[in-house]
Amino acid sequence: MKNQILWDCHMHSSFSADSKTDMEFMIQEAIVRGLKGICFTEHLDPDYPPTPDNQIFHLDLSAYRNRLSELKEKYRKHITVNFGIEYGLQPHLKQRFDQEMTLYPFDFVIGSSHVVHGCDPYYGEFFKNRRESDCYREYFESILENLRVFSDIDVYGHIDYIVRYGPNQNRDYSYEGYQDVLDEILRTLIHKNTGIEINTGGYHYGLGEPNPCTAVIRRYRELGGEIITIGADAHSPDKIAFAFDKAAAVLKDCGFRYYTIFKGRKPEFIRL
């Protein structure tokens, strides 16, 4: 089937601590895959807790911007390259992020929950000696805590990110099991005119679903949500536009006839 989604709006390069791939290689592969445009959304997670593998999610924003600008011009006849950021939200970081967003001309801002009350669920310690369902609920409630503080983001990233790393992943997880808190998240996002993404990383993590799952995406549309971007969360070239055929099918199944990209922080709607 011909790819109906020609923009990958969530990807990382070696400017992010958890990628080793040069930005230019990501661009070249996106061109090979026939994409019309991409948006780099490098990680910035200040106050990230110490980890067993010594990850430090620092980002040299000036170097990132300069390199992207150089490559954007170099490849402008082949692909559009947009300047984005993925902020790891924690309520006490609001002032810092607000200031940065006035200093850098981002096209697109993803706000994501990675750290939950001082711990990243990526590491198993978050789940140790606890019920998985309690951990999932704490994660979703932390999203609401962030949304009480942050308004100036374009979409909330991979809303059920936590199920990638739970002991049973999504075997016992469903939208219905957390409907009260998930509906509150979705209603809050819609009220703030903030979108969600279909993050196809869930497919390459073996979930058989994107993040968030299809039921959450459908509910977002039922509640009146319209802004929805598509990103593979690629940290290496082989994951660019991963399972975008499945993402297109999910969009249509959930009642969407378009997807969204951002340029200069403004949404543009592209028909499937």
Image (cartoon, grey):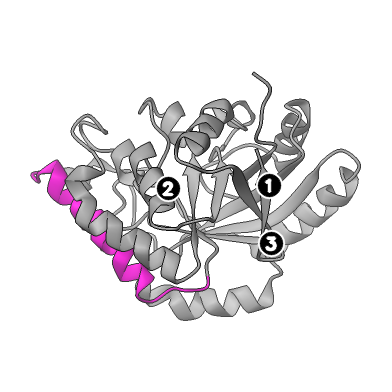
User: Most prominent secondary structure in the magenta stretch?
Assistant: helix
- Residue interval drawn in magenta: 128-152
Seen from the viewer's position, the closer of residues 179 and 203 is 179
The residue indicated by pointer 3 is: 107
- Mark number for residue 270? 1
**Quarter the C terminus occupies:** top right
Residue for point 35% across, 69% down = 146
Residue 118 visible? The answer is no
Residue for point 61% across, 32% down = 241
- Single out the mark in the foreground, 1 or 3: 1
Vertical side of 233 occupied by 224: above or below: below
Instruction: Give neighbour class at mark 3: few <14, some 14-19, many 20+ (Cα, 10 Å).
Output: many
Relative to 154, is 46 on the left or the right?
left
Residue kind at label 3, given as amino acid type: Asp
> The residue tagged with tag 3: helix, strand or loop?
loop
> The residue tagged with tag 1: helix, strand or loop?
strand
Residue kind at label 2, given as amino acid type: His
- Single out the mark in the foreground, 1 or 2: 1
Find the distance from the CA under tag 1 to the CA under tag 3.
16 Å
Picture quadrant of residue 100: bottom right
Mark found first going from the N terminus, 3 or 2? 3
**Quarter the N terminus occupies:** top right
- Mark number for residue 158? 2
Residue 136 among those drawn in magenta: yes
Mark found first going from the N terminus, 1 or 2? 2
Residue kind at label 1, given as amino acid type: Ile
